Amino acid sequence: MKCEQCPVRHRAVCAQSEWDDLGQLESMKFYRSFEPGQLITCEGDRMDFVASVVSGAATLTRITEDGRAQIVGLLLPGDFLGRPGRETAAFNAAAVSKLVLCCFRHKPFNEMMQKTPQIAHRLLQMSLDELDAARDWMLLLGRKLAREKIASFLLIIAKRKAALHNSQLGGRMEVELPLSRAAMADYLGLTLETVSRQISALNREGMIELTDNRLVILPDFGLLANEAGGDSPGVWII
Amino acid sequence: MKCEQCPVRHRAVCAQSEWDDLGQLESMKFYRSFEPGQLITCEGDRMDFVASVVSGAATLTRITEDGRAQIVGLLLPGDFLGRPGRETAAFNAAAVSKLVLCCFRHKPFNEMMQKTPQIAHRLLQMSLDELDAARDWMLLLGRKLAREKIASFLLIIAKRKAALHNSQLGGRMEVELPLSRAAMADYLGLTLETVSRQISALNREGMIELTDNRLVILPDFGLLANEAGGDSPGVWII
DNA sequence: CGGTCGATTGACCTATATCAACCCTAGTGG
DNA sequence: CCACTAGGGTTGATATAGGTCAATCGACCG
């Protein structure tokens, strides 16, 4: 695929790169695909590339010795996986849907970063945005009720979808959940039973309409936002 | 104070800057002091500078509409406050002890970042480290028991102290808590009563020795680490 | 048709929150 | 000098949100 036609061209780490830089990236990139459930790396593993998510979704997970898991990152199209200058994965990364990555080997990517400020700059921007998002997520994990966690999650997915498609936020929206109930639980610091119960409750009360297990209609975005426990939603629009 | 004598010279955003860059930073920096409890910025406020923590400690806090608070960042000596290119604070920032900041106005700092890759590069490094720390914190908030949260917190403070002084980790250590019980609760996603109870319990069991309310002796670092719920501790050493 | 996987629902339990009393220390002012 | 007060911390009794364990359901698949 040519970079110009790339669906994440204007959002990924290469977003601010100009023509000739893009040509260089083009020549060093390679695509990798993963099936739902497939591991990309394990914590501690050598990871010889960094990548942009082109399509699909992946999760970063941190696990305690006794097996409790917490998803600490949800990578959607445009997001960046890996850390330049670190060749050992700090987290388990797994595909949660059919996933396509646009990969770069560490060494050429590092050299590129040294030479072209745009890429380093964009990566800094993206990292700071992720940090903001992580901090909002800490508020959710530490202080929100189960119901609020679920509502917040639905909103963030809706917002990401709107941001990717440059479409409007608000009113009636349809979102496809990128995660299973179990994965949502690991994302929200809940059990899958609690996730299921809360989703059922929101459904019963008309806050959401469940069509498929993975397909949710939000009849009223604003109404649902009231249930999310009110952190300022602006920052989520990455 | 001259930059060469700065206690955080080798850890702050300026760590990788060379002589002449340092001269430039020197000419544009200015110091500000804050008393314990004093607000630095409120979410949404205009914030006309970025800064390095020289001494003392500050917290970043996120608050829900109905007043539940979560501390989402603990800034210790060397840490960076603010975001280049954003002049509106995204969080409440407050001093929790006598605090000294080394400040730079946005505009000259941005220009400096454009010109000198070292600063931008160091800031990227620091942001990525913070992101790693935030992700470990998400595991704590989402999945750890109260007792494990407290133990983890004591360990991270001990580790930061060791890192700053380049001293050894392990064995018997003494740490000064930068936070009140209430602030610890807001950091750990607990209530202050639960914090107090768990600290008392660890004290009773000899895992820690309380001298002052704010001064804790860890008789055996490794023993306490067992109580922390076992995320790989390596990443904490920022 | 049996088996597997994800999701839902129910009954019960527990870690932590909540509410409340109390303690200790430091500071203040009579 | 000492009573009074305020702020931080501890401790106890009770309530509850969400966890745990277990049964069931539906869809899909060989």
Image: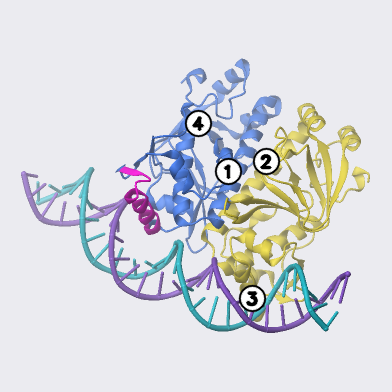
Chain colours: A yellow, B blue, C cyan, D purple
Q: Quadrant of the C terminus of chain B?
A: top right
Q: Are marks 2 and 3 on the same chain?
A: yes
Q: Which residue is mark 1?
A: B232
Is label 2 in a helix, a strand or a loop? loop
Q: Are marks 1 and 2 in contact (CB under 8 Å)?
A: yes
Left/right of residue A185 with respect to residue B59 in the rendered view: right
Whole-percent x and y of residue A33? 86, 50
Foreground tag (1 vs 3): 1
Q: Compared with residue A167, is residue C24 higher up or lower down, i.e. above or below?
A: above
Q: Compared with residue A51, is residue A38 higher up or lower down, i.e. above or below?
A: below
Task: Report, in whole angstroms, how far the alpha carbon at label 4 lies from the one at label 3.
Answer: 47 Å
Q: Main secondary structure of the magenta part?
A: helix
Chain of the residue under the numbered disc 4 shown in the image: B
Q: Which residues are magenta?
A: B193-210
Chain of the residue under the numbered disc 2 shown in the image: A
Q: Which residue is mark 2?
A: A44
Task: Report, in whole angstroms, how far the alpha carbon at label 4 lies from the one at label 2.
Answer: 22 Å
Q: Which residue is mark 4?
A: B163
The amino acid type, in three-letter code, at marker 1 is Ser
The amino acid type, in three-letter code, at marker 2 is Gly
The amino acid type, in three-letter code, at marker 4 is Ala
Which numbered dot is residue A202?
3
Is label 3 in a helix, a strand or a loop? helix
Task: Looking at the picture, tell me which residue is in the foreground, A203 or C13.
Answer: C13
Task: Report, in whole angstroms, how far the alpha carbon at label 2 lies from the one at label 3.
Answer: 40 Å
Foreground tag (2 vs 3): 2
